[in-house]
Amino acid sequence: MKAFLDKHFLLNSDAAVRLYENAAEGLPIFDFHCHLNPQEVWENNSYKSITEVWLGGDHYKWRTMRMHGIGERFITGNASDWEKFAAWAETVPHLIGNPLYHWAHMELKMYFGIEKRLSPETAREIFDECNEKLQKPEFKPRAFIERSNVKFIGTTDDPVSTLEYHQLLKNDQTFKAIIAPTFRPDGALFIERPTFKDWIEKLSEVSGIKVDTLDSFLQALKQRVDYFHEHGGRASDHDIQKMEYVQTTRDEIEPIFAKRLNGSELTEEELILYRAFLLTELGKMYAEKQWVMQLHMGAMRNNNTKMKNLIGPDTGFDSIGENNFAEGISRFLDALDQQDALPRTVLFNLNQKDNQVLAGMMGNFYEEGIPGKIQFGSGWWFLDHIDGMERQMKDLANVGLLSHFIGMLTDSRSFLSYARHDYFRRILCNILGEWVERGLAPDDFEFLEQMVRNIGYHNAEKYFLER
């Protein structure tokens, strides 16, 4: 029987251990998609408590606490930091089988040297020990990044952002990691939201282009793409809840845009046409800059209207949708490809039923000299557990080339979440090790170890940065 979280955690064969120790352990991290706040990195303040760095903004944890029956006051409410931590500690023993159980203890061990299991009995001791350490310089945001050996961080940024803190960090010679903005134009695509007109006013202000027509709107977005590129941006990211793609023209979209700009509601058909048109126009802009386009597909968001109204959107009440993406994605990528304007594209799904659809879609579009131009993204959100990551990589391997896979991302707001990269790498090594042990892959460890290094770091670095 193996001990919990021992040095061979998740490594179930000699081959897996060899791959991990020779190739994965100590690899740098290329975190190409996350939700870290660059201002927090720039200011580099000490945290007042483990609750702030561990529970603040973490809707993964919030969901499980609610499912355990914890009251909202102890999750997003006005309870003290200790009360919130104690409520989390009450929840953790019940998380066995959930990756949060592993991540919580990996983070305590990796960053704080704490190997005790978190429970109501150990909560106070762990809370106090963490808080004492958090006052030391090596427990500030920049130190967490450096200790985790992170080389690149792709944040998620609104096109109307000034990117002030990205620029400050870029100019700071004492900070070595690259923190690059990622263009996330939800405000442009979700035209039906009540905040649309306010967002348009901000876009006009930051771009210097008065947005009052479709043409001026596209000009303003192009100006922001240029601005992001000048500030190190090399990628976009899109929330695609449904992918219904219909080819349309600018003449058809102009009255739709004008109608919404005047405050009128749009029909579902008009929304589909508008989003298809704008995604295509944005894709052309990305291809011109040789950016990576990321499509995170399938979230069914803000299911609990009462809680959305009470504490706001994106607070842990999202779940997995069941829309079909095959035809829409195919038409969208093909429309761009026909215009020689298909950028590098990463396809992420949230429903495992779409795994083979997306893994197979990769082979339909390519470009000479770019291995894996279309990527099947890592298990994400509800799929970044052992089963989800294993299935994603095996489905990718079954119909594609696992060796060109760009690997893991944190998709997190926490500086402690880099433990997830180690989690992913152990799972990868275990898969390859199992194949060696079963005679499904040769024991060519020189090749396999380089494959692990590439998936763990180098493939993503080349994909996002090399041109």
Image (tube, grey):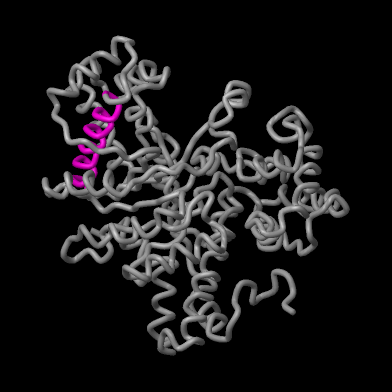
Nearer to us in this view, 130 or 434: 434
Give the vertical position of 453 relative to 349 (above or below): below
Q: Residue at x 35, y 32 (%)?
A: 159
Q: Position of residue 261 (x, y in %)?
A: 29, 14
Q: Is residue 152 left or right of residue 136?
A: left
Q: Quadrant of the C terminus?
A: bottom left
Nearer to us in this view, 451 or 229: 451
Q: Position of residue 10 (x, y in %)?
A: 61, 72
Please give the range of residues in magenta.
Answer: 270-289
Magenta run includes residue 181 = no
Nearer to us in this view, 114 or 422: 422
Q: Residue furthest right?
A: 121
Give the vertical position of 303 relative to 416 (above or below): above
Q: Is residue 426 left or right of residue 32?
A: right
Q: Residue at x 24, y 19 (%)?
A: 257
Magenta run includes residue 281 = yes
- Please tell me whether the stretch drawn in magenta is mainly helix, strand or loop: helix
Inspect this view and state whether residue 137 appears: yes
Q: Residue at x 69, y 69 (%)?
A: 5
Choose top left, top right, bottom left or bottom right for residue 464: bottom left
Nearer to us in this view, 269 or 424: 269
Give the vertical position of 404 relative to 228 (above or below): below
Q: Is residue 351 left or right of residue 56?
A: left
Q: Quadrant of the N terminus?
A: bottom right
Q: Position of residue 248 (x, y in %)?
A: 16, 31
